[in-house]
Amino acid sequence: MPLSRFHRKIGHLGGKAVPPERRTHWTKGKRRNDPGPEWPALRRQLRALLRPRAFATPGQPSRRGLARRLKVSDRSVRRWLAGEDWPARPSAAQLAAWLRRLERQR
């Protein structure tokens, strides 16, 4: 059965896999952001500051509060702290500014 003009246009290959260079989705497991040279130091500071909830003290910054401030999900912050992923450059810049403000307050 010949492919319609529509299917030829969108790259449908009659049930065959679409070559990777023609795919429009992000490959599973591929990271979207470059970590940048400052990320390892930021991650160490965050891990020291954002202790697990069981050991947190009142008034201490939380992962959830940080996620709200950066407008990202809690899961994103957990992945960053675990080393599974890293933030985009704008979020990393916001993190650095937030950490500097916290250091000045202490």
Image: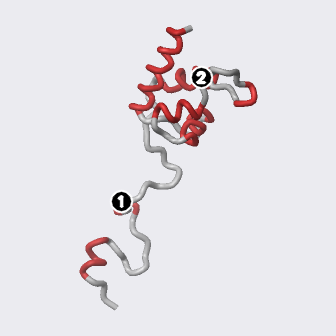
- Amino acid carrying label 2: it is Arg
Along the line of sight, which residue is nearer the eye, 91 or 102? 102
Q: Quadrant of residue 63?
A: top right
- Amino acid carrying label 1: it is Glu
Q: Secondary structure at mark 2?
A: helix
From the image, which quarter does the C terminus lie in? Answer: top right
Is the residue marked by circle 1 packed among few (<14), some (14-19), or many (20+) residues within 10 Å?
A: few
Across and down, in percent, residue 72 comes to 48, 39
Give the Cα distance between marks 1 and 2. 37 Å
Residue 94: mark: none
Question: Residue placed farthest to the right in the image?
Answer: 54
Q: Which dot, 1 or 2, sits closer to the camera?
A: 2
Left/right placement of residue 97 relative to residue 42 reads: left
Here the colouring is: secondary structure
Left/right placement of residue 57 relative to residue 86 reads: right
At x 32% / y 71%, what residue is drawn?
11
Across and down, in percent, residue 29 comes to 53, 50
At x 46% / y 33%, what residue is drawn?
70
Q: Secondary structure at mark 1?
A: helix
Is the residue marked by circle 2 packed among few (<14), some (14-19), or many (20+) residues within 10 Å?
A: few
Q: Quadrant of residue 17?
A: bottom left
At x 28% / y 77%, what residue is drawn?
8
Above or below, comparing residue 12 to residue 81 in the picture:
below
Left/right placement of residue 99 relative to residue 59 reads: left
Point out the tag, 1 or 2, that comes first from the N-terminus. Answer: 1
At x 52% / y 9%, what residue is drawn?
105
Residue 21: mark: 1
Which residue in the structure is indicated by mark 2? Answer: 44
From the image, which quarter does the N terminus lie in? Answer: bottom left
Along the line of sight, which residue is nearer the eye, 59 or 38? 59
